[in-house]
Image: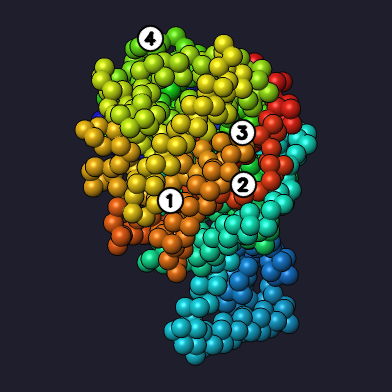
Amino acid sequence: MPSSSYVSLFDSNMTTPALLPLSGRRIPTLSPGAASFPHHRATLRLSEKFILLLILSAFITLCFGAFFFLPDNSKHKISLYFAPFISPSTLISLPVPASEKHPHSVMLPPPSFTVGMVPGFLQAEEEESLRDKIRVDHERALQEAKEKLRKSRDELRAEIQTEKSKVVEDLKKKKEVPKPLPPVPMPKVVGVNDGDPVEPDVKEKRDKIREMMKHAWDSYRQYGWGHNELKPLAKKGHSTNIFGNSQMGATIVDALDSLYMMGLHDEFKDGQEWIEQNLDFSVNAEVSVFEVNIRFIGGLLAAYYLSGQEVFKVKAVQLAEKLLPAFNTPTGIPWAMVNLKSGVGRNWGWASAGSSILAEFGTLHMEFVHLTYLTGNPAYYQKVMHIRKLLAKMDRPNGLYPNYLNPRTGRWGQHHTSVGGLGDSFYEYLLKAWLMSDKTDTEARKTYDDAIEAIERHLIRKSNGGLTFIGEWKNGHLERKMGHLTCFAGGMFALGADGSPDDKAGHYLQLGAEIAHTCHESYDRTVLKLGPEAFKFDSGLEAVAVRQNEKYYILRPEVIETYWYMWRFTHDPKYRQWGWEAAQAIDKYCRVSGGFSGVKDVYSSNPTYDDVQQSFFLAETLKYLYLLFSSDDLMPLESWVFNTEAHPLPRENGVKLQHCRS
Ligand code: DMJ
């Protein structure tokens, strides 16, 4: 017994619970052995009867409640206890959850119950039919088990594998319910034709480029399908850190529009099918926001505009959504990398003071404006305009944009400026934003003009041998070195000539021609007639690489890109000639049986391979070569703007983008 005033629910000596209402009567003594209820009263009071009745009805309600509201399998158990009140037929037909629909889980009373507990309740016939059913079920199960045992390990493994793949396929199908996008008018597609050149020798050259494309594609198709890139010597897939550990078929997406333009329609269809069935962005991969934007989003958008196939638009938008968390920084300047699954972003470890890179966060505009147009979601446009506004407010040392900007503090990192790696496509996208807006985005044009003016003043020089080059600005000094990447600027100057301030169109076209010439020299002064990664104009050196680690050629497009723009604006036959020299050198020194590979030393007559077929070789290098040997009415520059990965997007006279501006 409790020693305190605590009253236990049921006292061992009590006939009724001790916690009955006590009002109106004396509190019963709770001393050991003492009965708590008066013994002299034989009948219950009216109020006590009422309370007992209440308890009884509560108990009955509880039982019914349990039956109706407990989960199904509990009900089945309960049904066993209520079996005496339910006919066997009702018992058998109780609903069985789909997952339990197996011969052995049919709800039957256990034999001991039916036979032992309620003899005579079941009709003899019903009892017999139940026993039969149980017997049949047991036999069937035994038979199944025997059959399984008779199968070999391999057969069983194959069976399990088939089942597994079915489950995976079903899951994939469930996941791939595309989000409905608002209907937006498809731009009038201009200049998507075969671009057949009139001259037979030009046609022959173009056929050769198409054949090279086919070799690159077929090799990837055979040895690297679904991987991001190809190792043409090892003949297997290649993965690079810019796409994390994903297998997102970068080469397929990057190559699509080239295939389309070259009339390789079966290959295009093959790529489209892979994308429809396999391209999935819910992967735990940390990718470069810039690279994914220019290659994947650019590639998918171009494929959409060229072919009109909705799947490309849907995939581009799905991917773009995954990139948005990269902008969650204190300044809105995006991280260089983002994990596609978690949305966590960070910057490259090597970048100055945790900075983001100018050429990366400054090369999103074209694709993001199109995303807003296609989705009606202003977020994309706002993100890139926010970057532009932030940059406009910042001080620029000597009018130059440093390559590094810290996304936490909003301050510049090291004062390095380059028109090559780390800076290049930032300038390109200012010009192309203006072109893409059908020249209405004058803010972009002005920013471009100011930047180019500062670049000309501080970075562009003539070498002793008379070659115009673009150096790199490092903490107040000019490094007289030019990268292969910088060679794209020849094309950019030519493209920006029309519309340049103070009637300097002729000047910029001339500047483009000079850069094209310098870059051609960098090719021509090598043994393989392919350009090195970087070349110097110093200590008597003219357009040649010095360091071993600058002598490689990795199938880059920039020099050929500039030849193509110069060809379109001048029709000077030397550009076709130079392009053809490069194409021949690539075919001679980079072609292997499993595709095309970069080479490690363009000054060696016996070069070794780097064993990578870069996706941009199919997206850019071969596309620019193909266009160089096509007639100008294929993809006219009045209607299309090529992104920095050579993916064409329609200009505003084709697709009205104004309404998506805030
Ligand atoms: C391409 O991915 C793009 O052109 C980018 O802007 C920089 N360079 C590579 C190819 O060299």
Q: Nearer the viewer, mark 2 or mark 1?
A: 2
- Disc 3 target residue: 569
Give the class, few, some or many, for how many residues have Cα within 10 Å of label 4's Cα (few <14, many ≥20). few
Per the rendering, the mark at residue 627 is 2
Going by the numbered disc 1, the residue's amino acid type is Leu
Going by the numbered disc 2, the residue's amino acid type is Leu
Q: Nearer the viewer, mark 3 or mark 4?
A: 3
Q: Secondary structure at mark 3?
A: helix
Q: Nearer the viewer, mark 1 or mark 3?
A: 3
Give the class, few, some or many, for how many residues have Cα within 10 Å of label 1's Cα (few <14, many ≥20). many
CA gap, disc 1 and disc 3: 25 Å
Going by the numbered disc 4, the residue's amino acid type is Asp
Q: Secondary structure at mark 1?
A: loop
Tell whether label 4 touches label 3 (CB within 8 Å).
no
- Disc 4 target residue: 395
Q: Is residue 498 visible?
A: yes
Q: Secondary structure at mark 2?
A: helix
Quadrant in the rendering for residue 300: top right
Does 119 sit left or right of 515 as displayed? right
The percent position of residue 556, horizontal first and vertical second, equals 44, 46
Does 104 sit left or right of 400 as displayed? right
Per the rendering, the mark at residue 452 is none
Q: Earlier in the sequence, mark 2 or mark 4?
A: 4
Which quarter of the image is occupied by the N terminus? top left
Give the class, few, some or many, for how many residues have Cα within 10 Å of label 3's Cα (few <14, many ≥20). some
51 or 216: nearer the viewer: 216
Per the rendering, the mark at residue 555 is 1
Residue at x 34%, y 50% (from the top left corner)? 526
The percent position of residue 193, horizontal first and vertical second, equals 74, 48
CA gap, disc 1 and disc 4: 37 Å
Q: Is residue 20 visible?
A: no
Q: Earlier in the sequence, mark 1 or mark 3?
A: 1
